[in-house]
Structure formats: C-alpha cells, structure tokens
C-alpha cells in the first residue's frame, strides 16, 4: 500500500482521460528528458512498466528514475523478454512478433548490464508469463478464435512445463534496482 501514487505521461489527452477517471496526480513530462518533469516529491518506488522498449533515450529514463526516487528508494523496470521462447518459432515462418513502436529488445543480461553500467545496483530480477497473450476472446471472430486456440493451448503447455525448467525464456522481465 502506498501513501500516494503519481504518474508521468507525455500525452496530454491521455492525462485528461486519467484525471476524469479519478487519477489526479499525473503530470505532463517526457521520461527521456529528466528536466521536463516537475514533481517536488521523492518516491520510495519509481516504476517504468513496459515503456523502456519504446524509447530512444534510455539513459534519460534512467536519470529520470535517479532524480525522482528517494535515497533508499528503488526503481522497477518491466519489459518484454528478447529471449522469450516463441520469438524464434514465429521467425521460422517469416514473422517477427514485435510491437511496431518498439525500438529495443532486452534480455536479463542486457538490462542488467545497462543498469549496472549506469551506476545502479541490481537487487532482484524476476521473469513473468503473460497468460492471456494468445487467448481466444469473445471480441474475435470464430475463424480467428479457431486459429488462436491451438496456439493458446500450446503456449499454456509450454508455460507449465518448459518455462518452469528454463525461466530465462519467459515472456517478460522485471528488474528491481537501487
């Protein structure tokens, strides 16, 4: 439980929508430009959830985290895992399963190196599985769901077997650092 929750976003329209929905502690700023964020507080936890892979100036993000966390505070970064098991499977069929706005991929080794070379101490790393990534939904057509179902079932099988043996090929990374 936290005493207060703050957010930073570059999108003025998104900030307006968040505020309409009750999230009042949101400021406009660019996490790649630490000087653009005007929050006087220091925080025990600074979370950058699934944004690092969209950025061009990662060192700017790391400096933003440094400037906004308290002395004993931690940073937490989550990002998709470059080593996730299904990346090479899709590439064998000529597909690259990546969001069109991603600029980078990270593995546990590369993100640890980035953080340590930026003066941070890694406290912990975790791997996570996105259990719903291939799940058929009510919003999809019957044909699309029939295509997704075997992929979803295969993914569930891998998630309960292979990924438990070799977690380094999980869907995503969580890194906690100081």
Image (spheres, helix red, strand yellow):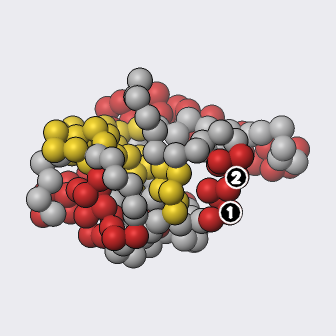
Question: Is any atom of residue 18 visible in this view?
Answer: yes
Front residue of 170/160: it is 170
Residue 150 in picture, x, y percent from top left: 68, 40
Residue 141 in picture, x, y percent from top left: 87, 48
Residue at horizontal 40 percent and vertical 63 percent from the top: 37
As drawn, 58 above or below 47: below
Q: Quadrant of the N terminus?
A: top left
Residue 96 in picture, x, y percent from top left: 54, 67
Instruction: Please state if 83 lies on the left or on the right of 70 as rendered.
Output: right
The residue indicated by pointer 2 is: 17
2 and 1 marks in contact (CB < 8 Å): yes
Residue 24 in picture, x, y percent from top left: 58, 44
Label 1: which secondary element: helix
Give the farthest residue toward the top: 1
As drawn, 83 above or below 25: below
Residue at horizontal 27 percent and vertical 69 percent from the top: 59
The residue indicated by pointer 1 is: 13
Q: Quadrant of the C terminus?
A: top left
> Which mark, residue 112?
none
Residue at horizontal 40 percent and vertical 70 percent from the top: 36
Circle 1 residues within 10 Å: few <14, some 14–19, many ≥20? few
Give the farthest residue toward the right: 142
Front residue of 67/168: it is 67
Front residue of 62/132: it is 62
Distance from disc 2 to disc 1, alpha carbons, whole Å, reads 6 Å
As drawn, 149 above or below 114: above
Q: Quadrant of residue 166?
A: top left
Label 2: which secondary element: helix
Question: Is any atom of residue 173 visible in this view?
Answer: no
Front residue of 176/40: it is 40
């Amino acid at each position: 439980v936290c005493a207060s929750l703050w957010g930073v976003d570059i999108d003025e329209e998104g900030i307006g929508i968040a505020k309409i929905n009750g999230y009042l502690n949101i400021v406009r700023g660019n996490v790649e430009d630490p000087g653009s964020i005007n929050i006087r507080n220091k925080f025990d936890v600074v979370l950058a959830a699934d944004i690092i892979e969209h950025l061009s100036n990662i060192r700017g993000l790391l400096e933003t985290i440094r400037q906004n966390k308290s002395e004993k505070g931690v940073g937490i970064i989550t990002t998709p895992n470059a080593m996730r098991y299904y990346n090479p499977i899709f590439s064998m069929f000529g597909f690259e399963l990546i969001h069109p706005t991603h600029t980078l991929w990270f593995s546990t080794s590369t993100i640890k190196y980035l953080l340590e070379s930026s003066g941070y101490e890694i406290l912990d790393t975790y791997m996570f599985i996105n259990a719903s990534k291939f799940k058929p939904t009510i919003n999809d057509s019957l044909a699309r769901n029939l295509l997704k179902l075997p992929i979803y079932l295969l993914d569930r099988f891998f998630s309960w077997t292979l990924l438990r043996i070799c977690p380094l090929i999980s869907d995503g990374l969580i890194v906690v650092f100081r």
